[in-house]
Image (spheres, rainbow, N blue to C red):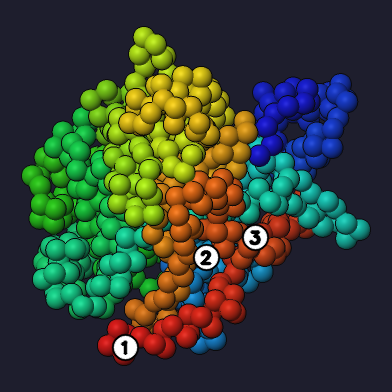
Amino acid sequence: MAPIKSPFQKAVSNLKAPSAAAYVQADWDTAYKSATPTVEDTRLYEAARWIAAEAEEARQRFPSPVFGPLSAEWATILAVAALNREYRTAVKLRSEALKKRGAAEPFISMDAMSGVRISSDTGQHFTTEDLAESSTDLTENWLFDALSATGPNPPPDELSFYAIEAGRAYSFRKSLNTLWNQARHEGWFFEQGPDGIARWNPGSRQDMVLNQTWLQRQKSNLMNYPNIDISVWPQLTVSQRRKRARTHGITSATRTGRTVKFKVSSPSYLSTRPPHYAIERSALEGAFLNDFLETDMPNISGVKASMLLLACYLILDIANELSKEVKLPALLSPTHAEQLALSVPADVLRDALVQGIPVSSEIASAIIDFLTFELKNGSNEKGNRGLWSAPLVKVPNRDEYLLPLPALETSNPARKVEAWLEKGGIDDVNPVTARGILYETLYRSRIKDEIDNNKKFKSASAAEHGIKPSKDFKEEIDLLVSFGGLCIVGEVKLFLMPTEPGERVRYDGKLESAAKQAKRKAEALKAKPEVAAAALGISVQDAATLQYLPLVVTAQNYGFSTRVEDVLVVEAEFLKMYLSGSDIVIGRAIQLGSSRTVDQTKEYYAKEASAAKNFVKEASSPYVLTRISERFVWATSPFPTLAHAGATLAVPVFRDVSGAERRRAQSLIDMLSPTRA
């Protein structure tokens, strides 16, 4: 990260961003000349000038509004149509890339499955998720402007020109905003060669790889439970599969004039692979969010997160069925645009939820309202993650909704449900449904169970209720565990995984605060061993000899293995696995086109003493992270320019398993019975 430290950075922190129309170069020049600039200051100043020049050229190049003669209604339809067309094209390219990889490399790691990159005609490298994220985010800007479009109805007979122009304008604007946030918060800078090409690099390649590693680790964690389902699914009967998945779904949907006819029935589940709903539901069951899926939401009576998940998949059923009827046209008529945008009447959506969940008509309407995209206005910020948590787009002046495919298909399950819970009133502000307290309680219980069942431990102990403040001891301890002479004093935090530079900066501040608390509490316990003794059920003499180790324990991965304020940050799932004493699955490879998999496992210790001795080392450089980070290699990807000769971005590309790992996977899978295929 690149925290604001220097006088120059503080001086410009309140100035308009270079991508904004109100940016004033003279203000930046004055701030720079008034400072004794550091290398980082100069890089930031030059980045601002470069981005400002591009932004100004874009304002000259792209008309405003970019929708031309379109009304708010048709500008909205065109936004979702363009998004769905781009996403479907990327999915097709990814499928082709996987087929080519499957022919050359029949075994692929589960990590790499989610990191397959495709290349555009311009040489850009991106995953389908990358494109889905950037396209969906820029579509939100498009939808904001669409509301102010004032063109008449009906629209022109050909809309592809407006789709292309608007797509270019919003894509370029999004690219510049992203680049600026990276320069401001993470120190991105450029070096310009004799050819005039600006070569952009992150302020720290190590930090960027670590950020990508944490995100990849999160995906791996979310697949812990689904991997079990994937292995077992082929052996299940159809009735057993329905119990693990959905009993009802939209099994057909066709467009007839201005309406959509659909059929709700039991899915056949004939495939040997579990459906997406079963995988996502299983992922959530294996995550910290499982404990909140069936909790009633105070802000939407009669609704639970599990019902919202079912609703989203019923909506996705309709989207997928309607997409089958729609080819990707070269030209775009209004009819094609409506079909690509997957427009559905409100009463059809409501009836689908009534029959498919099932719920009353009133609750179905409430769910639709809850899942409808709203522009942030200051009063609806809570739980508003844009299209990712609200994937229904209301068409202005119509009782119809549009279905953005990438928001429905690729949204991060944990972030989506986190947003729903927050919007629904299940958060730490509400004392009745406080998530943090419940999570700490359940996590302590699970840690105690792991320790009690760990046959390698002989004298380990966990404080079942932590430590509550008292007259003689003012601190509250979330997690207290002793083993092999080591005593972990854990500050447990239920933080949402950050994904963009601004979020990471805010998260860093939270980690710093948590680290200071953990350090203070460990020192307090060290000074009063009798308090630790009482909580752990050991003698005061034994408590006095313990080595007290402050830890920040996070529900998700960000910060894992790093030190903040000299306090180690550890992922909750890793700590639980470590204390279990069992061999840990550290990687999984799959044979493309089959259900055959092979796991890599590792034993961290054989005895309690070695568990304590090795803990800091293993948690500081955990193989579950290094096996991911070591697979990243650097490539360059073109960056679009209007005011300069050209630009490239440094991009970390995630490679698949090494040759040695692949040979091991081949050897082990060859030993599997053919009936496992």
Depth check, mark 2 against mark 1: the one in front is: 1
Q: Amino acid at mark 3?
A: Pro
Q: Residue farthest to the left?
A: 360
Image position, residue 114 (x, y; %): 47, 65
- Residue 151, above or below 549: below
Left or right? Give the position of 300 relative to 334.
left
Crowd around label 3: few <14 · some 14–19 · many ≥20 (10 Å): some
Image position, residue 675 (x, y; %): 27, 88
- Residue 283, above or below 420: below
Left or right? Give the position of 127 relative to 531.
right
Image position, residue 119 (x, y; %): 60, 70
Pointers 3 and 2 in contact (C-beta within 8 Å): no
The C terminus - image quarter:
bottom left
Q: Residue farthest to the top?
A: 471
Q: Amino acid at mark 2?
A: Gly
Query: Looking at the rendered structure, which numbered label has been put on residue 115?
Result: 2
Q: Which residue is mark 1?
A: 673
Query: Looking at the rendered structure, which numbered label has been put on residue 652?
Result: 3
Q: Is 108 or 437 nearer to us in this picture?
A: 437
The N terminus - image quarter:
top right
Give the spatial CA distance, label 1 vs label 3. Answer: 38 Å
Query: Looking at the rendered structure, which numbered label has been put on residue 32?
Result: none
Q: Residue at x 22, y 52 (%)?
A: 311
Give the spatial CA distance, label 3 vs label 2. Answer: 11 Å
Q: Is 251 or 238 nearer to us in this picture?
A: 238
Depth check, mark 1 against mark 3: the one in front is: 1
